[in-house]
Structures are given as C-alpha cells and as structure tokens.
C-alpha cells in the first residue's frame, strides 16, 4: 500500500513516525474466505506476542528504522546489484493421523513453489497486464533448500517427523514446543523452520515477523493446503501459495492493505503497492482492473499480490518494493540465514556453529579498523565485505599470522552496517559488523 515512508533515519521525527506505524490502532478481525477458511492469522499471532513480550513493539520499530535506512541507501545507488540469498529450510511435520504425515514429495513440491515464486520463475506472473504493473514484478533473489545438517552437525534430510496426540493446533504456538505435542525449533539464526500440522478452524497458516522470540520463530502451514499436484493440497488453496504468503511475513512483508479495517490509512511500508481498502478473496481473470474506496482509478488494487488473500490461482507477484524489504531483512535482522548457494546448505550445522564460536571480529562497532581472530589451525582466509546495499567493498585473501589475528582496514568506507563473509579451510561464515565514528 502506497504511503509516505521514512526519509531521514537519524532524526527523532523518523523514529516517532516509524513507531507510530506499529503503534497505530490496528483493527484485526478474523474473517472467513468464501470457502470458509481463515487465510492467515499472522497479525493475530503478532498481537498475542506483543502482549506476552512488552518490548517486541519497540524492537520492531527499531528494525523498521534500519530496514528503511537500507532501502533508502539502495535507492541512492540504483545500479547496485542485490544479493542472491540461499535459505536453509527444515520442515517439522507434526501429525496425529497418517494423512497429516505428508510425504517427502509434498514437501519437495512445496519447496519448489517457494523457489519459483521468490525467483520470478512462476509462469503465471505474465498474467500481470494492468497498466505499469508488469514492470514491477520482481525476482526477490531468494533461494530455498533443505538443510543437510542438523544443529548438532549430523546429516539430515531437512525434514523431522513427530507423532502427536494433539488433534489440531492453533495460533498459540504449541506446535513449536515438544512438551506441548509439537517439535522444538532449530536454531532460528541458521534455519527457516516451517511446521506442517493440522490447524483447526479452517486456518491455513501463520508466521512470525523478525524480532519475536527465538523459541517460536518460523512459519506454520496447514498440512492440507500445500501442493495439490503432489497430493497434499485442497482447492482453492492447492498451489503452495499459503507458504509463499507466510514466508513473506517471516521476511518482513506486511499485508498489502495494511490491516487498517478499510480506513485507507494503514501501510505495508512499501511504496509501489497501491493503496487498498481491505483484503481481497476474489479470483479475478488475468488483467482485470478492480478499484475500491482506496484505489479509485486504474490500475486499481493489486489483487494478484502474494501478500493479499486471494485464491492460490490468482496470487502470482511480488513488487520491486517488496523485494527491497526482503533483501533488507536478509541483510540485517535475518542475516544469519545467508549461505552460499553452491554449498547446497552444507554450511549449516556443526562446522558453521564451531566457526562462529572460534572466529570473532573486534572491536564491533569500530571506527573502521577490525581484527579477526581465528582457530590456530587456520593459516589463511578469503574475506569479502559487503555494504548495506550488497556491494562488495573488499575482496582479499588474508594470511593469518602465528598470533591467530588478522587485520582489515575499512577506514575509507562510510559509517553503516557491513557483512563479512569469511571462507576458511574449515568452512564459511558470515558476520555482521558496524562502522560508527
């Protein structure tokens, strides 16, 4: 939804504006689709989490300031290429009946849908023919792959299976705890956790925004509304777009209409999504221009956006502005998920955890000069440093002296957040640092 965004991220006015975006009197109602389903309960879950954690709203406001800072910085250098991210995924299948214990084929098909939708490889995006919108359809440059190592370093298929006595779960996060009949989260800084279970009340799924508790971080989808072609999806929610929508929330995307109860005042914090009065459930023919109280003229409201509520068959685009938020999220609040696409997720597990324990960068924050301390058996490292807009500002091979401490000088670079990607004989890690003079 288009709304004036934060333009100066260093003033108190900006902070107040950002906080008010989250503190607004949000109207959240549980509405049913024409087929009697609840499309998404992420915002209801968020309100519950805010009640349980009084500091959550302030953390999310701070994260929004950083998100907008990164986006604005990127706009100043439009020729900069964004980063291709690969996210390790673990599916936690929690089942009470045999039907709920969905097959590996179902999960692989769901993963394929995520990859297609987030890489603009879905063939139906070409249906976007409303004036000016085809140019907005974005490749978010995010890949998803099944984790090959569990948190202890053992080989894994990226799938866990848990038999439970619980007949159905709700948005209270019980499915995320072994003690409550579900399955405990894997390290949320290394994996996207997706729980697959039976959700009651016709609920299709919900997710947790960045900033929430580590123990409940991830996405929950109903086992019956995945991919119909693989035998695990019921129309009209049978093309895997429930997961696409919920992972969008996990990567800091809001509902396109701003959850404002048709007031036309809420915001999804994205500039290129048109204002929209409320959620849309209707599946329109390709190219149909629809207007409402907020989008009063052509091209109307963006009913085919993944962050609306339409049926799976009419959900087929992210915008460039939404991509910018996703990229900012993966650079900042979810930067730990980034791993090389060439590793096929093999960097996730004991090697990376050990390296994070034994490779450190200090001082952090710094005025520009950093020291990297390493394990004694590491003699050299390849270091790439990326700025907030994904540019590689340093790429060099460093020899590690006997002291185990290598130096790198970024004094000529401006203040801000940087990512160090460090490749050694023991594996590759990514660490975030800050230059602040």
Image (tube, rainbow, N blue to C red):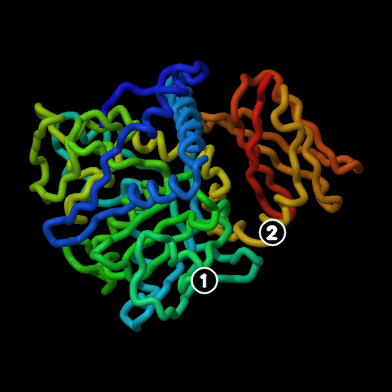
Q: State whether residue 228 appears in this view.
A: yes
Q: Residue furthest bottom?
A: 98
- Rendered residue at 62%/21% (across/down): 415
Q: Which mark is residue 421?
A: none
Label 1 sits on residue:
178
Do the residues under discs 2 and 1 have CB atoms within 8 angstroms?
no
Looking at the image, is mark 2 or mark 1 nearer the viewer? 1
Q: Is residue 357 left or right of residue 278?
A: right
Q: Is residue 168 left or right of residue 154?
A: left
Position of residue 327 measured from the top left corner of the image (x, y, whole percent)? 45, 38
Q: Quick one: label 2, few (<14), some, or many (20+) residues within 10 Å?
A: some
Q: Quick one: label 1, few (<14), some, or many (20+) residues within 10 Å?
A: some
- Rendered residue at 57%/47% (across/down): 336
Q: Residue furthest right?
A: 402
Label 2 sits on residue:
351
* Picture layout, residue 381 above or below residue 414: below
Position of residue 50 measured from the top left corner of the image (x, y, whole percent)? 44, 45
Depth check: 13 or 154 in front? 13
- Sequence-wise, the earlier of marks 2 and 1 is 1
Depth check: 312 or 250 in front? 250
Q: Secondary structure at mark 1?
A: helix
Position of residue 1 measured from the top left corner of the image (x, y, whole percent)? 26, 32
Q: Secondary structure at mark 2?
A: helix
Position of residue 66 measured from the top left corner of the image (x, y, whole percent)? 50, 30
Depth check: 410 or 333 in front? 333
* Picture layout, residue 92 above or below residue 274: below
- Rendered residue at 46%/71% (across/down): 182
Depth check: 12 or 346 in front? 12
**The C terminus is located in which quarter?**
top right
- Rendered residue at 23%/64% (across/down): 238
């Amino acid at each position: 939804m288009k709304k004036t965004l934060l333009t100066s991220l260093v003033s108190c006015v900006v902070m107040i504006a950002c906080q008010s975006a989250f503190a607004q009197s949000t109207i959240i109602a549980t509405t049913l689709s024409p087929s009697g389903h609840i499309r998404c309960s992420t915002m209801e879950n968020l309100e519950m989490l805010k009640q349980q954690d009084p500091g959550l709203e302030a953390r999310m406001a701070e994260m929004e300031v950083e998100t907008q800072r990164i986006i604005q910085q990127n706009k100043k250098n439009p020729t900069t290429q964004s980063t291709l991210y690969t996210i390790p995924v673990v599916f936690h299948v929690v089942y009470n009946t045999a039907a709920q214990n969905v097959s590996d084929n179902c999960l692989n098909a769901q993963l394929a849908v995520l990859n297609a939708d987030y890489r603009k490889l879905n063939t139906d995006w070409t249906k976007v023919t409303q004036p000016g919108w085809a140019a907005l359809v974005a490749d978010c440059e995010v890949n998803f792959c099944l984790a090959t190592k569990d948190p202890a370093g053992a080989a894994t298929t990226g799938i866990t299976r848990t038999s439970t006595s619980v007949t159905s779960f709700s948005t209270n996060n019980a499915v995320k705890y072994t003690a409550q009949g579900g399955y405990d989260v894997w390290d949320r800084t290394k994996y996207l956790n997706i729980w697959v279970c039976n959700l009651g009340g016709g609920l299709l799924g919900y997710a947790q925004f960045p900033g929430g508790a580590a123990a409940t971080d991830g996405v929950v989808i109903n086992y019956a509304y995945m991919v119909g072609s693989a035998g695990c999806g019921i129309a009209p929610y049978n093309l895997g777009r429930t997961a696409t929508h919920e992972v969008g929330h996990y990567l800091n995307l809001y509902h396109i209409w701003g959850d404002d109860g048709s007031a036309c005042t809420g915001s999804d914090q994205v500039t290129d999504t048109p204002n929209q009065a409320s959620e849309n459930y209707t599946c329109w023919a390709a190219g149909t221009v629809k207007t409402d109280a907020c989008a009063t003229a052509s091209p109307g409201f963006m009913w085919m956006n993944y962050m609306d509520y339409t049926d799976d068959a009419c959900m087929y685009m992210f915008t460039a502005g939404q991509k910018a938020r996703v990229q900012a999220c993966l650079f900042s609040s979810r930067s730990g998920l980034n791993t090389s696409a060439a590793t096929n997720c093999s960097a996730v597990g004991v090697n990376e955890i050990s390296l994070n324990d034994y490779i450190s960068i200090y001082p952090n924050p710094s005025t520009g000069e950093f020291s990297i301390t390493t394990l004694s058996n590491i003699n050299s490292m390849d270091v790439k440093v990326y700025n907030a807009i994904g540019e590689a500002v340093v790429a060099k091979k460093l020899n590690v002296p006997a002291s185990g401490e290598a130096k790198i000088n970024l004094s000529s670079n401006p203040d801000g957040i940087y990512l160090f990607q460090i490749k050694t004989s023991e594996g590759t890690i990514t660490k975030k640092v800050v230059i602040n003079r």
